Amino acid sequence: MATTASNGSAAARASVASLGNASDNASNASAGQVLGVCLGDRYRQIRSFSETLCRPLEIEDYGIQTMADVSPPKWHLGHVSWFFETFLLVPHLPGYEVFHPQFGYLFNSYYEAVGERHPRPQRGLLSRPTVAEVYRYRTYVDRAMERLMETRLKETRPKETRLQETRLMTAQGKEGKDDEEAIAGEAIAALIVLGLHHEQQHQELLLTDLKHILALNPLRPAYRRDLATVQAVTVPAGTAQAGTAQAGTGQAGTGQERLPQNQAILPRELEYVGFEGGVVELGRDVAAWESRFDAFAFDNEGPKHRVYVGAFAIAHRLITNGEYLEFIAAGGYQQPQHWLSEGWGTILNAGWEAPLYWEKIDGAWFVMTLAGLQPLNLHEPVCHVSLYEADAYASWAGKRLPTEAEWELVAQQQLEQCYRAGQLASPEQWALQGNFVERDHLHPQPCPAEQPEPHVPIQQLFGDVWEWTQSAYLPYPGFKAAVGAIGEYNGKFMCSQHVLRGGSCATSVSHIRATYRNFFPPSTRWQFAGIRLAQSVSNPRPIHRPG
Protein backbone atom coordinates (compact mmCIF):
# COMPACT_ATOMS: atom_id res chain seq x y z
CA MET A 1 0.00 0.00 0.00
CA ALA A 2 2.89 2.39 0.63
CA THR A 3 4.76 4.01 -2.22
CA THR A 4 8.09 5.73 -2.41
CA ALA A 5 8.05 9.27 -1.07
CA SER A 6 8.70 10.78 -4.50
CA ASN A 7 5.93 8.84 -6.22
CA GLY A 8 3.54 9.49 -3.37
CA SER A 9 4.34 13.20 -3.45
CA ALA A 10 3.71 13.43 -7.18
CA ALA A 11 0.40 11.65 -6.78
CA ALA A 12 -0.54 13.97 -3.93
CA ARG A 13 0.20 17.06 -6.04
CA ALA A 14 -1.91 15.72 -8.91
CA SER A 15 -4.78 14.84 -6.59
CA VAL A 16 -4.70 18.27 -4.93
CA ALA A 17 -5.01 19.88 -8.35
CA SER A 18 -8.00 17.71 -9.23
CA LEU A 19 -9.50 18.50 -5.82
CA GLY A 20 -9.75 22.16 -6.75
CA ASN A 21 -11.12 21.36 -10.20
CA ALA A 22 -13.79 19.08 -8.77
CA SER A 23 -14.83 21.80 -6.36
CA ASP A 24 -15.22 24.30 -9.20
CA ASN A 25 -17.12 21.83 -11.38
CA ALA A 26 -19.51 20.91 -8.59
CA SER A 27 -20.26 24.54 -7.80
CA ASN A 28 -21.09 25.18 -11.45
CA ALA A 29 -23.55 22.28 -11.69
CA SER A 30 -27.03 23.28 -12.81
CA ALA A 31 -29.77 23.43 -10.20
CA GLY A 32 -31.70 20.67 -11.91
CA GLN A 33 -28.80 18.23 -12.15
CA VAL A 34 -29.61 14.76 -10.83
CA LEU A 35 -28.22 14.42 -7.31
CA GLY A 36 -26.93 10.90 -7.87
CA VAL A 37 -24.55 11.97 -10.63
CA CYS A 38 -23.20 15.10 -8.97
CA LEU A 39 -22.94 13.53 -5.53
CA GLY A 40 -21.37 10.37 -6.91
CA ASP A 41 -18.56 12.39 -8.46
CA ARG A 42 -18.04 14.26 -5.23
CA TYR A 43 -18.03 11.01 -3.26
CA ARG A 44 -15.35 9.44 -5.45
CA GLN A 45 -13.18 12.55 -5.41
CA ILE A 46 -13.19 12.97 -1.62
CA ARG A 47 -12.72 9.27 -0.89
CA SER A 48 -9.82 9.15 -3.32
CA PHE A 49 -8.15 12.16 -1.71
CA SER A 50 -7.98 10.36 1.66
CA GLU A 51 -5.93 7.62 0.05
CA THR A 52 -3.82 10.14 -1.84
CA LEU A 53 -2.85 11.75 1.46
CA CYS A 54 -1.55 8.35 2.59
CA ARG A 55 0.55 7.59 -0.50
CA PRO A 56 3.75 9.18 0.86
CA LEU A 57 3.55 6.94 3.94
CA GLU A 58 5.62 3.86 4.61
CA ILE A 59 3.78 0.82 5.89
CA GLU A 60 5.25 1.36 9.39
CA ASP A 61 3.63 4.82 9.60
CA TYR A 62 0.06 3.53 9.44
CA GLY A 63 -0.21 2.07 12.95
CA ILE A 64 1.48 4.67 15.17
CA GLN A 65 -0.39 6.50 17.93
CA THR A 66 1.67 9.07 19.86
CA MET A 67 -0.98 10.27 22.32
CA ALA A 68 -4.66 9.70 23.05
CA ASP A 69 -5.79 12.58 20.81
CA VAL A 70 -3.83 11.18 17.84
CA SER A 71 -5.21 8.24 15.87
CA PRO A 72 -3.16 5.96 13.60
CA PRO A 73 -3.59 6.67 9.86
CA LYS A 74 -5.13 3.25 9.26
CA TRP A 75 -7.74 3.96 11.94
CA HIS A 76 -8.79 7.15 10.13
CA LEU A 77 -9.12 5.22 6.86
CA GLY A 78 -11.22 2.58 8.55
CA HIS A 79 -13.35 4.90 10.65
CA VAL A 80 -14.62 7.05 7.77
CA SER A 81 -15.55 3.87 5.90
CA TRP A 82 -17.35 2.56 9.00
CA PHE A 83 -19.37 5.78 9.04
CA PHE A 84 -20.76 5.11 5.55
CA GLU A 85 -21.31 1.43 6.32
CA THR A 86 -23.10 2.07 9.62
CA PHE A 87 -25.30 5.06 8.78
CA LEU A 88 -26.00 4.38 5.09
CA LEU A 89 -25.32 0.88 3.84
CA VAL A 90 -26.71 -1.20 6.71
CA PRO A 91 -30.04 0.67 6.98
CA HIS A 92 -30.56 1.69 3.34
CA LEU A 93 -29.03 -0.92 1.00
CA PRO A 94 -31.12 -4.12 1.01
CA GLY A 95 -29.04 -7.27 1.35
CA TYR A 96 -25.87 -5.48 2.45
CA GLU A 97 -23.55 -7.56 4.64
CA VAL A 98 -20.95 -5.86 6.82
CA PHE A 99 -17.34 -6.42 5.80
CA HIS A 100 -16.29 -7.70 9.24
CA PRO A 101 -18.52 -8.21 12.29
CA GLN A 102 -15.93 -6.68 14.69
CA PHE A 103 -15.07 -3.58 12.65
CA GLY A 104 -17.98 -1.76 14.23
CA TYR A 105 -16.27 -2.18 17.60
CA LEU A 106 -12.83 -1.18 16.28
CA PHE A 107 -13.81 1.86 14.22
CA ASN A 108 -16.64 3.42 16.21
CA SER A 109 -15.34 6.69 17.62
CA TYR A 110 -17.80 8.02 20.18
CA TYR A 111 -21.32 7.02 19.12
CA GLU A 112 -22.88 5.55 22.25
CA ALA A 113 -26.14 4.73 20.45
CA VAL A 114 -24.28 2.45 18.03
CA GLY A 115 -22.65 0.27 20.66
CA GLU A 116 -19.42 -0.43 22.50
CA ARG A 117 -16.07 0.57 21.05
CA HIS A 118 -12.34 -0.01 21.41
CA PRO A 119 -10.72 2.45 23.86
CA ARG A 120 -9.41 5.52 22.04
CA PRO A 121 -5.95 5.58 23.73
CA GLN A 122 -5.39 1.96 22.60
CA ARG A 123 -5.95 2.38 18.86
CA GLY A 124 -2.21 2.27 18.27
CA LEU A 125 -1.80 -1.09 20.02
CA LEU A 126 -3.48 -3.07 17.23
CA SER A 127 -1.38 -4.71 14.53
CA ARG A 128 -4.57 -6.15 12.99
CA PRO A 129 -6.47 -5.45 10.86
CA THR A 130 -3.55 -5.00 8.50
CA VAL A 131 -3.20 -1.93 6.32
CA ALA A 132 -4.05 -4.07 3.29
CA GLU A 133 -7.25 -5.28 4.95
CA VAL A 134 -8.29 -1.71 5.79
CA TYR A 135 -7.86 -0.74 2.14
CA ARG A 136 -9.92 -3.77 1.11
CA TYR A 137 -12.57 -2.57 3.54
CA ARG A 138 -12.60 0.84 1.86
CA THR A 139 -12.99 -0.75 -1.57
CA TYR A 140 -15.81 -2.97 -0.32
CA VAL A 141 -17.66 0.01 1.14
CA ASP A 142 -17.08 2.14 -1.97
CA ARG A 143 -18.54 -0.51 -4.27
CA ALA A 144 -21.60 -0.84 -2.06
CA MET A 145 -21.99 2.95 -1.92
CA GLU A 146 -21.95 3.05 -5.73
CA ARG A 147 -24.84 0.59 -5.73
CA LEU A 148 -26.69 2.64 -3.15
CA MET A 149 -26.29 5.86 -5.11
CA GLU A 150 -27.26 4.18 -8.36
CA THR A 151 -30.43 2.64 -6.99
CA ARG A 152 -31.62 5.17 -4.39
CA LEU A 153 -30.48 8.50 -5.88
CA LYS A 154 -31.09 7.79 -9.56
CA GLU A 155 -34.38 9.71 -9.72
CA THR A 156 -33.73 12.08 -6.85
CA ARG A 157 -34.00 15.74 -7.73
CA PRO A 158 -32.68 18.64 -5.64
CA LYS A 159 -35.18 20.10 -3.17
CA GLU A 160 -35.35 23.42 -5.06
CA THR A 161 -36.37 21.60 -8.26
CA ARG A 162 -39.08 19.58 -6.50
CA LEU A 163 -40.48 22.69 -4.79
CA GLN A 164 -40.67 24.50 -8.12
CA GLU A 165 -42.51 21.55 -9.64
CA THR A 166 -44.92 21.44 -6.69
CA ARG A 167 -45.68 25.17 -6.97
CA LEU A 168 -46.24 24.84 -10.72
CA MET A 169 -48.65 21.93 -10.25
CA THR A 170 -50.52 23.82 -7.55
CA ALA A 171 -50.84 26.87 -9.80
CA GLN A 172 -52.29 24.63 -12.51
CA GLY A 173 -54.89 23.26 -10.10
CA LYS A 174 -53.20 19.91 -9.83
CA GLU A 175 -52.32 18.12 -6.65
CA GLY A 176 -48.67 18.85 -5.92
CA LYS A 177 -47.12 16.24 -3.68
CA ASP A 178 -43.52 15.29 -3.21
CA ASP A 179 -42.72 11.85 -4.44
CA GLU A 180 -42.05 9.63 -1.40
CA GLU A 181 -39.14 7.93 -3.11
CA ALA A 182 -37.60 11.27 -3.93
CA ILE A 183 -37.97 12.40 -0.32
CA ALA A 184 -36.33 9.20 0.93
CA GLY A 185 -33.57 9.62 -1.64
CA GLU A 186 -32.96 13.16 -0.47
CA ALA A 187 -32.62 11.96 3.12
CA ILE A 188 -30.03 9.42 1.96
CA ALA A 189 -28.24 12.11 -0.04
CA ALA A 190 -28.13 14.32 3.06
CA LEU A 191 -26.44 11.52 5.03
CA ILE A 192 -23.92 11.00 2.22
CA VAL A 193 -23.11 14.72 2.27
CA LEU A 194 -22.64 14.55 6.05
CA GLY A 195 -20.36 11.53 5.59
CA LEU A 196 -18.25 13.38 3.01
CA HIS A 197 -17.80 16.43 5.24
CA HIS A 198 -16.99 14.02 8.05
CA GLU A 199 -14.29 12.47 5.86
CA GLN A 200 -12.88 15.91 5.08
CA GLN A 201 -12.58 16.55 8.81
CA HIS A 202 -10.62 13.33 9.14
CA GLN A 203 -8.40 14.27 6.22
CA GLU A 204 -7.31 17.30 8.23
CA LEU A 205 -6.94 15.19 11.37
CA LEU A 206 -4.89 12.69 9.36
CA LEU A 207 -2.39 15.45 8.49
CA THR A 208 -2.22 16.91 11.99
CA ASP A 209 -1.89 13.44 13.51
CA LEU A 210 0.85 12.52 11.04
CA LYS A 211 2.73 15.68 11.95
CA HIS A 212 2.62 14.73 15.63
CA ILE A 213 3.71 11.17 14.82
CA LEU A 214 6.69 12.30 12.74
CA ALA A 215 7.66 15.08 15.18
CA LEU A 216 8.09 12.59 18.02
CA ASN A 217 10.54 10.59 15.93
CA PRO A 218 14.16 11.65 16.75
CA LEU A 219 14.98 11.34 13.03
CA ARG A 220 12.46 14.17 12.30
CA PRO A 221 11.36 12.49 9.06
CA ALA A 222 9.41 14.48 6.48
CA TYR A 223 5.94 13.52 5.34
CA ARG A 224 6.78 15.09 1.96
CA ARG A 225 10.03 16.78 0.99
CA ASP A 226 8.50 18.49 -2.06
CA LEU A 227 6.15 20.82 -0.17
CA ALA A 228 6.54 24.47 -1.15
CA THR A 229 8.19 26.43 1.67
CA VAL A 230 9.10 30.08 2.12
CA GLN A 231 12.76 30.85 2.80
CA ALA A 232 13.13 31.44 6.50
CA VAL A 233 14.85 34.23 8.37
CA THR A 234 16.61 32.44 11.20
CA VAL A 235 16.82 33.89 14.68
CA PRO A 236 19.05 32.86 17.59
CA ALA A 237 17.16 31.19 20.42
CA GLY A 238 16.50 33.50 23.33
CA THR A 239 16.50 36.71 21.30
CA ALA A 240 13.64 38.92 20.20
CA GLN A 241 12.74 40.20 16.79
CA ALA A 242 13.30 43.87 16.09
CA GLY A 243 10.43 45.87 14.74
CA THR A 244 7.58 43.64 15.89
CA ALA A 245 4.34 44.89 17.39
CA GLN A 246 4.98 45.83 21.00
CA ALA A 247 2.88 45.14 24.03
CA GLY A 248 0.35 47.65 25.25
CA THR A 249 2.62 48.30 28.26
CA GLY A 250 5.48 49.31 25.97
CA GLN A 251 7.73 46.77 27.67
CA ALA A 252 8.10 44.31 24.78
CA GLY A 253 11.67 43.15 24.51
CA THR A 254 12.97 45.53 27.17
CA GLY A 255 16.40 44.43 28.29
CA GLN A 256 16.54 41.73 25.63
CA GLU A 257 19.09 41.38 22.84
CA ARG A 258 17.61 42.64 19.56
CA LEU A 259 18.22 41.48 16.01
CA PRO A 260 19.67 43.78 13.34
CA GLN A 261 16.90 45.47 11.36
CA ASN A 262 17.85 43.67 8.14
CA GLN A 263 16.96 40.36 9.76
CA ALA A 264 13.52 41.43 10.94
CA ILE A 265 11.47 42.49 7.92
CA LEU A 266 7.78 42.15 8.73
CA PRO A 267 5.03 41.62 6.13
CA ARG A 268 3.38 44.86 7.29
CA GLU A 269 3.02 46.48 10.68
CA LEU A 270 -0.01 45.21 12.53
CA GLU A 271 -3.06 47.40 11.96
CA TYR A 272 -6.54 47.35 13.47
CA VAL A 273 -9.72 47.79 11.46
CA GLY A 274 -12.78 49.13 13.26
CA PHE A 275 -16.27 47.65 13.04
CA GLU A 276 -19.37 49.39 14.30
CA GLY A 277 -21.45 47.36 16.72
CA GLY A 278 -25.12 46.61 16.59
CA VAL A 279 -27.62 43.79 16.41
CA VAL A 280 -26.49 41.26 13.81
CA GLU A 281 -27.62 37.86 12.58
CA LEU A 282 -25.27 34.94 13.11
CA GLY A 283 -25.35 31.29 12.10
CA ARG A 284 -27.41 29.47 9.51
CA ASP A 285 -30.85 27.93 9.45
CA VAL A 286 -30.14 24.21 9.56
CA ALA A 287 -33.45 22.39 9.62
CA ALA A 288 -31.90 19.10 8.47
CA TRP A 289 -28.72 17.77 6.93
CA GLU A 290 -28.55 19.40 3.48
CA SER A 291 -28.55 17.09 0.46
CA ARG A 292 -26.48 19.54 -1.61
CA PHE A 293 -22.78 19.39 -0.78
CA ASP A 294 -22.18 23.12 -1.35
CA ALA A 295 -25.19 24.10 0.80
CA PHE A 296 -24.23 21.94 3.78
CA ALA A 297 -23.79 23.20 7.33
CA PHE A 298 -23.34 21.24 10.54
CA ASP A 299 -26.15 21.38 13.07
CA ASN A 300 -24.04 23.41 15.53
CA GLU A 301 -23.96 26.31 13.03
CA GLY A 302 -27.63 27.05 13.63
CA PRO A 303 -30.22 28.20 14.17
CA LYS A 304 -29.73 31.67 12.75
CA HIS A 305 -30.19 34.15 15.58
CA ARG A 306 -29.68 37.78 16.49
CA VAL A 307 -27.01 38.99 18.90
CA TYR A 308 -25.68 42.36 19.98
CA VAL A 309 -22.05 43.07 19.16
CA GLY A 310 -20.33 46.11 20.64
CA ALA A 311 -17.99 48.25 18.56
CA PHE A 312 -14.60 46.61 18.15
CA ALA A 313 -11.42 46.60 16.10
CA ILE A 314 -9.67 43.52 14.78
CA ALA A 315 -6.12 42.96 13.55
CA HIS A 316 -5.72 42.96 9.77
CA ARG A 317 -3.57 39.80 9.86
CA LEU A 318 -2.49 36.92 12.06
CA ILE A 319 0.26 37.14 14.68
CA THR A 320 3.62 36.02 13.29
CA ASN A 321 6.35 33.80 14.71
CA GLY A 322 8.53 36.89 15.10
CA GLU A 323 5.91 38.71 17.13
CA TYR A 324 5.32 35.68 19.31
CA LEU A 325 9.07 35.40 19.80
CA GLU A 326 8.96 38.87 21.40
CA PHE A 327 6.54 37.47 23.95
CA ILE A 328 8.88 34.56 24.71
CA ALA A 329 11.97 36.79 24.96
CA ALA A 330 10.13 39.19 27.27
CA GLY A 331 9.58 36.32 29.71
CA GLY A 332 5.98 35.60 28.73
CA TYR A 333 6.19 31.97 29.84
CA GLN A 334 7.55 33.02 33.23
CA GLN A 335 5.02 35.77 34.06
CA PRO A 336 1.81 34.44 35.64
CA GLN A 337 0.00 37.79 35.36
CA HIS A 338 -0.66 37.14 31.66
CA TRP A 339 -2.12 33.65 32.08
CA LEU A 340 -5.47 32.16 32.94
CA SER A 341 -5.20 30.08 36.11
CA GLU A 342 -5.65 26.78 34.27
CA GLY A 343 -3.22 27.91 31.60
CA TRP A 344 -0.52 28.79 34.13
CA GLY A 345 -0.95 25.43 35.82
CA THR A 346 -0.76 23.69 32.47
CA ILE A 347 2.50 25.29 31.34
CA LEU A 348 4.10 24.58 34.73
CA ASN A 349 3.04 20.94 34.71
CA ALA A 350 3.81 20.35 31.02
CA GLY A 351 6.98 22.46 30.92
CA TRP A 352 5.88 24.54 27.92
CA GLU A 353 8.35 27.25 26.91
CA ALA A 354 7.35 27.80 23.28
CA PRO A 355 4.71 26.66 20.77
CA LEU A 356 4.51 22.96 19.95
CA TYR A 357 7.14 21.80 17.43
CA TRP A 358 9.57 24.69 18.14
CA GLU A 359 13.09 23.49 18.93
CA LYS A 360 16.37 25.16 19.90
CA ILE A 361 19.30 23.72 17.94
CA ASP A 362 22.80 25.18 18.20
CA GLY A 363 21.43 28.48 19.45
CA ALA A 364 18.75 28.92 16.77
CA TRP A 365 15.03 28.26 16.57
CA PHE A 366 13.70 25.53 14.29
CA VAL A 367 10.19 24.20 13.76
CA MET A 368 8.94 20.77 12.74
CA THR A 369 6.76 20.84 9.62
CA LEU A 370 5.29 18.20 7.33
CA ALA A 371 8.32 18.92 5.12
CA GLY A 372 10.63 18.04 8.01
CA LEU A 373 12.56 20.22 10.45
CA GLN A 374 12.94 23.78 9.10
CA PRO A 375 14.48 27.04 10.35
CA LEU A 376 11.80 29.17 12.01
CA ASN A 377 10.39 31.71 9.55
CA LEU A 378 9.67 34.92 11.45
CA HIS A 379 7.06 36.05 8.95
CA GLU A 380 4.78 33.00 9.06
CA PRO A 381 1.74 32.96 11.35
CA VAL A 382 2.51 31.38 14.68
CA CYS A 383 0.65 28.09 15.02
CA HIS A 384 0.26 25.06 17.26
CA VAL A 385 -0.54 27.23 20.25
CA SER A 386 -3.22 26.48 22.81
CA LEU A 387 -6.07 28.77 23.82
CA TYR A 388 -4.07 29.41 26.99
CA GLU A 389 -1.05 30.63 25.01
CA ALA A 390 -3.18 32.68 22.61
CA ASP A 391 -4.95 34.37 25.51
CA ALA A 392 -1.68 35.02 27.38
CA TYR A 393 -0.12 36.59 24.30
CA ALA A 394 -3.18 38.81 23.84
CA SER A 395 -3.01 39.90 27.48
CA TRP A 396 0.69 40.67 27.18
CA ALA A 397 0.03 42.70 24.02
CA GLY A 398 -2.68 44.73 25.74
CA LYS A 399 -5.40 43.26 23.51
CA ARG A 400 -7.78 40.30 23.59
CA LEU A 401 -8.99 37.47 21.39
CA PRO A 402 -12.07 38.15 19.23
CA THR A 403 -15.41 36.61 20.11
CA GLU A 404 -16.86 34.20 17.58
CA ALA A 405 -19.67 36.70 16.91
CA GLU A 406 -17.12 39.39 16.05
CA TRP A 407 -15.19 37.00 13.81
CA GLU A 408 -18.31 35.92 11.93
CA LEU A 409 -19.50 39.50 11.52
CA VAL A 410 -16.15 40.38 9.91
CA ALA A 411 -16.21 37.31 7.68
CA GLN A 412 -19.80 37.85 6.51
CA GLN A 413 -19.20 41.52 5.74
CA GLN A 414 -15.99 40.82 3.86
CA LEU A 415 -17.62 38.08 1.79
CA GLU A 416 -20.45 40.48 0.94
CA GLN A 417 -17.93 43.14 -0.08
CA CYS A 418 -16.07 40.66 -2.28
CA TYR A 419 -19.36 39.77 -3.94
CA ARG A 420 -20.17 43.42 -4.62
CA ALA A 421 -16.68 43.89 -6.05
CA GLY A 422 -17.32 41.04 -8.49
CA GLN A 423 -14.86 38.59 -6.94
CA LEU A 424 -17.50 36.02 -5.93
CA ALA A 425 -20.36 34.51 -7.88
CA SER A 426 -22.55 34.96 -4.79
CA PRO A 427 -22.09 36.00 -1.15
CA GLU A 428 -22.50 32.30 -0.25
CA GLN A 429 -19.42 31.22 -2.24
CA TRP A 430 -16.83 30.43 0.38
CA ALA A 431 -13.99 29.44 -1.97
CA LEU A 432 -11.78 32.41 -1.10
CA GLN A 433 -8.11 32.63 -1.95
CA GLY A 434 -6.93 31.34 1.39
CA ASN A 435 -4.08 28.96 2.09
CA PHE A 436 -6.05 25.70 2.20
CA VAL A 437 -4.98 22.10 1.57
CA GLU A 438 -5.51 22.71 -2.17
CA ARG A 439 -2.53 25.09 -2.13
CA ASP A 440 -0.37 22.10 -1.16
CA HIS A 441 1.82 24.02 1.30
CA LEU A 442 0.44 22.16 4.33
CA HIS A 443 1.96 24.95 6.40
CA PRO A 444 0.96 28.54 7.23
CA GLN A 445 2.29 31.17 4.82
CA PRO A 446 3.37 34.80 5.47
CA CYS A 447 0.84 37.55 4.94
CA PRO A 448 1.46 39.54 1.73
CA ALA A 449 3.35 42.76 2.39
CA GLU A 450 1.35 44.87 -0.03
CA GLN A 451 -1.68 46.91 1.01
CA PRO A 452 -4.87 44.84 0.61
CA GLU A 453 -7.73 45.93 -1.63
CA PRO A 454 -10.30 48.16 0.11
CA HIS A 455 -12.98 45.46 0.11
CA VAL A 456 -10.62 42.94 1.75
CA PRO A 457 -9.15 44.84 4.72
CA ILE A 458 -8.81 41.71 6.89
CA GLN A 459 -6.22 39.29 5.52
CA GLN A 460 -5.65 35.59 6.25
CA LEU A 461 -9.23 35.31 7.48
CA PHE A 462 -9.69 31.89 5.87
CA GLY A 463 -7.00 29.21 5.74
CA ASP A 464 -3.46 29.17 7.20
CA VAL A 465 -4.48 28.56 10.86
CA TRP A 466 -7.65 28.08 12.83
CA GLU A 467 -8.15 31.23 14.90
CA TRP A 468 -8.85 30.87 18.59
CA THR A 469 -11.77 32.94 19.87
CA GLN A 470 -12.55 33.80 23.46
CA SER A 471 -15.98 32.17 23.06
CA ALA A 472 -16.90 28.95 24.81
CA TYR A 473 -18.39 26.28 22.57
CA LEU A 474 -22.07 26.41 23.54
CA PRO A 475 -25.36 25.77 21.72
CA TYR A 476 -26.98 28.64 19.87
CA PRO A 477 -30.45 29.67 21.11
CA GLY A 478 -32.96 27.10 19.90
CA PHE A 479 -30.36 24.43 19.05
CA LYS A 480 -31.66 20.87 19.15
CA ALA A 481 -29.54 17.83 18.42
CA ALA A 482 -30.90 15.34 15.89
CA VAL A 483 -32.56 12.18 17.17
CA GLY A 484 -30.43 9.04 17.31
CA ALA A 485 -26.72 8.42 16.90
CA ILE A 486 -26.24 11.22 14.34
CA GLY A 487 -27.35 13.66 17.04
CA GLU A 488 -24.14 12.79 18.93
CA TYR A 489 -22.01 14.36 16.21
CA ASN A 490 -21.62 17.83 17.79
CA GLY A 491 -24.10 18.56 20.54
CA LYS A 492 -22.70 16.42 23.34
CA PHE A 493 -19.32 18.20 23.19
CA MET A 494 -20.74 21.61 24.13
CA CYS A 495 -18.84 21.79 27.40
CA SER A 496 -15.28 22.81 28.39
CA GLN A 497 -14.23 23.64 24.83
CA HIS A 498 -13.55 26.84 22.88
CA VAL A 499 -14.54 27.88 19.37
CA LEU A 500 -12.02 28.29 16.54
CA ARG A 501 -12.86 29.89 13.19
CA GLY A 502 -11.58 30.16 9.62
CA GLY A 503 -9.99 26.84 8.66
CA SER A 504 -6.31 26.04 8.19
CA CYS A 505 -3.69 25.02 5.66
CA ALA A 506 -4.92 21.43 6.14
CA THR A 507 -8.61 22.25 5.59
CA SER A 508 -10.36 21.69 2.26
CA VAL A 509 -11.72 24.90 0.76
CA SER A 510 -14.98 23.11 -0.08
CA HIS A 511 -15.39 22.25 3.61
CA ILE A 512 -15.16 25.72 5.18
CA ARG A 513 -17.61 28.63 5.43
CA ALA A 514 -18.09 31.78 7.50
CA THR A 515 -20.48 30.07 9.93
CA TYR A 516 -18.26 27.00 10.55
CA ARG A 517 -17.63 26.39 14.27
CA ASN A 518 -14.62 24.24 15.08
CA PHE A 519 -14.02 23.42 18.73
CA PHE A 520 -11.27 21.99 20.91
CA PRO A 521 -10.31 21.95 24.61
CA PRO A 522 -8.23 25.02 25.60
CA SER A 523 -5.05 22.98 26.09
CA THR A 524 -5.07 21.66 22.50
CA ARG A 525 -1.87 22.35 20.54
CA TRP A 526 -1.50 19.69 17.86
CA GLN A 527 -3.96 21.39 15.51
CA PHE A 528 -2.97 24.23 13.14
CA ALA A 529 -4.27 26.91 15.53
CA GLY A 530 -3.05 30.49 15.75
CA ILE A 531 -3.79 34.01 16.98
CA ARG A 532 -5.64 37.08 15.76
CA LEU A 533 -6.01 40.01 18.14
CA ALA A 534 -8.98 42.29 18.76
CA GLN A 535 -9.96 45.11 21.08
CA SER A 536 -13.13 46.84 22.19
CA VAL A 537 -13.42 50.46 21.05
CA SER A 538 -15.83 53.34 21.57
CA ASN A 539 -15.33 55.02 18.20
CA PRO A 540 -14.01 52.62 15.52
CA ARG A 541 -12.09 54.12 12.59
CA PRO A 542 -12.41 53.18 9.80
CA ILE A 543 -15.99 52.09 10.35
CA HIS A 544 -17.45 48.92 8.84
CA ARG A 545 -21.16 48.79 9.59
CA PRO A 546 -23.06 45.50 9.94
CA GLY A 547 -25.58 44.67 7.23
Image (cartoon, rainbow, N blue to C red):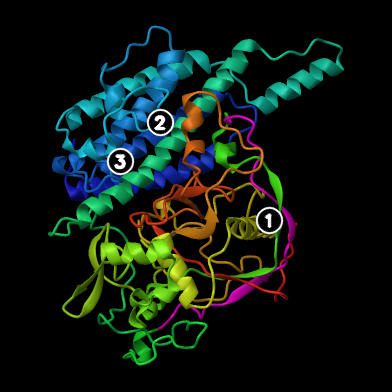
Circle 1 packing at 10 Å, graded few (<14), some (14-19), many (20+), is many
Q: Residue at the location (45% across, 31% down)?
A: 195
Quadrant of image for the C terminus: bottom right
Residue 23, percent from left and from top: 50, 42
Residue 513, percent from left and from top: 56, 48
Label 2 – label 3 distance at C-alpha: 12 Å
| Circle on res. 44 | 2
Q: Is residue 226 above or below residue 240?
A: above
Q: Which residues are magenta?
A: 265-290
Mark 2 residue type: Arg
Q: Characterize the magenta stretch by its predominant secondary structure.
A: loop
Residue 125, percent from left and from top: 16, 36
Q: Are marks 2 and 3 in contact (CB under 8 Å)?
A: no
Q: Is residue 316 above or below residue 191?
A: below
Figure quadrant of residue 190: top right
| Circle on res. 52 | 3
| Circle on res. 416 | 1
Please count the marks in the image.
Answer: 3
Q: Is 209 left or right of 321, judged from the image as shown?
A: left
Figure quadrant of residue 136: top left
Of pointers 2 and 1, the one earlier in the residue sequence: 2
For discs 2 and 1, the disc positioned in front in the rendered view:
1
Label 2 – label 1 distance at C-alpha: 32 Å
